[in-house]
């Protein structure tokens, strides 16, 4: 069933190279000093990424002078768009006052930002770090230390960062589904301690706990799975996860790097009525700056501190709780809390328009495409979504085992061909779509639909 897009991609890539010559030249220069021309694999699209000069609201401008409508939006972090004025002005004032760069001391900002996180998420303790990868790694360390167990249970298709307990079961394998180890160099003993379950499958979760429950240190799961397909967890799944982890003495970790503060001014777990033992936050809370946090029960979090002999070495790095980053985080959280009743309904409305606009655009050109991100009884329609191209007409992928399976969906078309084709009309998408923000307008979404129709025509000519 898989299609060969080699000739189609070559044709569109050649057109794109003519469209963006300066970015092409900069890519040649970059590849001489940077591996593959950059420092984050997902940004390094083929044949080359647009090299960005400025960003504002829903738009970026590249080195070729193209004004590009952006749905990547800082790896889905910028729910208010690029460089919101209230944030950049706060940072500017901070620097002008002689503050902002690293001092090596604690300050009031850490306290105030942690208080906001505790109040909006139900957590008892917080510790800040600089990335979602580190936050999930430290959360798992805490769970293993607290329980004295070794096994980590995660979801197939779930991405928890490039850390040892996250590097299995991320990509769908040809022979064994989500069971592959993602990198060379990991100790075999570590990968054997990673169990992978199916997202939104409570029966499979119950079976795995029945067999391994007394040895499972933690179950780490995203209430809204990101890289696995941008899909919400079923309410039953979340409640079964909480009941099983309590029954077997397992730490429940919610990875809310993607979902936290995306649907409300706080955690997503509360919308399900489920309080995890630990949660990892990032992306939205930083306001565009590098901020992440582990938050949760004091009994577990205190393993970091002097009371419990500092048993878990979550001591922090040089840039942990960097003053400028914490100012951005505090300013962003205060803004989201104060404007919660305006921001989140607007995101839901724009998401609904975006999902139907892109599906309709491809349908009009005779191509079946399906958005993920549609809501359920708990989560409203998601501002973050993927656009998938199922081989079977009418198929609606329900979990990562379908959404990320190349035998079910045309991933090359959605991940590579479409991305370049859309850039020819100055629209930037990832995983087929991306995220809408409050900076996007309904007129922007009309442009998105028009770009999708033109991309569909290019694609049809090469199929």
Image (tube, helix red, strand yellow):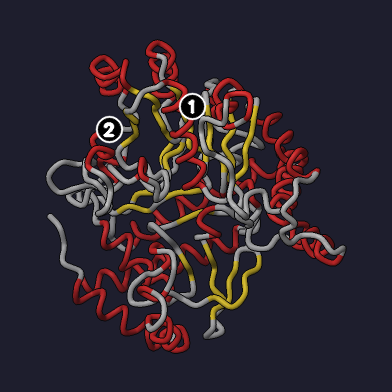
- Whole-percent x and y of residue 399? 31, 38
Q: Is residue 214 visible?
A: yes
* Circle 1 Cα neighbour tier, 10 Å, few/some/many (<14 / 14–19 / ≥20): few
Q: Which residue in the structure is indicated by mark 2?
A: 193
* Front position in the image: 3 or 458: 3
- Whole-percent x and y of residue 201? 30, 26
Q: Which residue in the structure is indicated by mark 1?
A: 377
Vertical arrangement, residue 264 with respect to residue 388, above or below? above
Q: Quadrant of residue 290 in the image?
A: bottom right
* Circle 2 Cα neighbour tier, 10 Å, few/some/many (<14 / 14–19 / ≥20): some
- Whole-percent x and y of residue 384? 49, 48
- Report the Cα–Cα distance between label 1 and label 2: 34 Å
Label 1 sits on a secondary structure element that is: loop
Q: Is residue 19 visible?
A: no
Vertical arrangement, residue 455 with respect to residue 347, above or below? below
Which residue does the image show at 28% across and 48% down from the upper left? 186
- Whole-percent x and y of residue 58? 60, 63
* Front position in the image: 453 or 100: 100
């Amino acid at each position: 069933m898989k299609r060969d897009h080699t000739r189609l991609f070559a044709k569109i890539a050649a057109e794109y190279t003519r469209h963006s010559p300066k970015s092409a030249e900069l890519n040649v220069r970059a590849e001489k000093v940077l591996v593959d021309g950059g420092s984050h694999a997902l940004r390094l699209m083929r044949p080359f990424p647009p090299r960005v000069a400025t960003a504002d609201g829903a738009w970026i401008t590249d080195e070729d002078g193209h004004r590009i409508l952006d749905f990547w939006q800082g790896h889905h972090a910028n729910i208010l768009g690029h460089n919101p004025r209230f944030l950049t002005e706060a940072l500017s004032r901070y620097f002008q006052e002689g503050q902002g760069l690293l001092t090596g001391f604690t300050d009031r900002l850490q306290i105030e930002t942690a208080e906001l996180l505790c109040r909006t998420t139900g957590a008892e303790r917080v510790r800040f770090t600089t990335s979602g990868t580190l936050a999930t790694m430290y959360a798992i360390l805490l769970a293993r230390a607290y329980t004295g167990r070794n096994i980590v249970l995660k979801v197939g298709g779930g991405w928890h960062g490039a850390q040892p307990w996250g590097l299995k079961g991320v990509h769908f394998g040809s022979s064994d589904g989500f069971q592959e180890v993602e990198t060379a160099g990991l100790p075999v003993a570590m990968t054997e301690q990673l169990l992978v379950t199916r997202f939104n499958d409570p029966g499979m979760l119950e079976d795995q706990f029945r067999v391994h429950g007394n040895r499972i240190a933690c179950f780490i799961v995203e209430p809204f799975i990101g890289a696995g397909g941008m899909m919400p967890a079923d309410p039953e799944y979340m409640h079964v996860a909480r009941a099983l982890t309590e029954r077997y003495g397992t730490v429940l970790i919610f990875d809310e790097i993607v979902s936290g503060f995306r649907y409300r001014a706080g955690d997503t777990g509360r919308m399900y009525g489920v309080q995890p033992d630990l949660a990892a936050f990032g992306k939205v809370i930083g306001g565009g700056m590098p901020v992440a946090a582990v938050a949760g029960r004091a009994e577990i979090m205190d393993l970091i501190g002097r009371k419990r002999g500092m048993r878990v070495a979550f001591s922090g790095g040089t840039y942990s709780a960097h003053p400028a980053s914490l100012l951005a985080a505090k300013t962003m959280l205060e803004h989201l809390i104060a404007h919660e009743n305006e921001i989140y309904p607007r995101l839901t409305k724009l998401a609904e328009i975006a999902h139907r606009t892109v599906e309709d655009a491809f349908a009009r050109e005779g191509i079946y495409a399906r958005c993920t991100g549609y809501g359920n009884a708990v989560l409203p329609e998601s501002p973050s979504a993927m656009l998938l191209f199922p081989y079977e007409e009418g198929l609606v992928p329900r979990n990562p085992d379908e959404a990320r399976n190349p035998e079910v969906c045309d991933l090359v078309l959605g991940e590579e061909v479409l991305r370049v084709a859309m850039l020819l009309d100055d629209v930037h998408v990832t995983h087929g779509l991306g995220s809408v923000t409050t900076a996007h307008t309904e007129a922007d979404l009309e442009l998105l639909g028009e770009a999708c129709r033109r991309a569909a025509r290019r694609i049809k000519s090469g199929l």
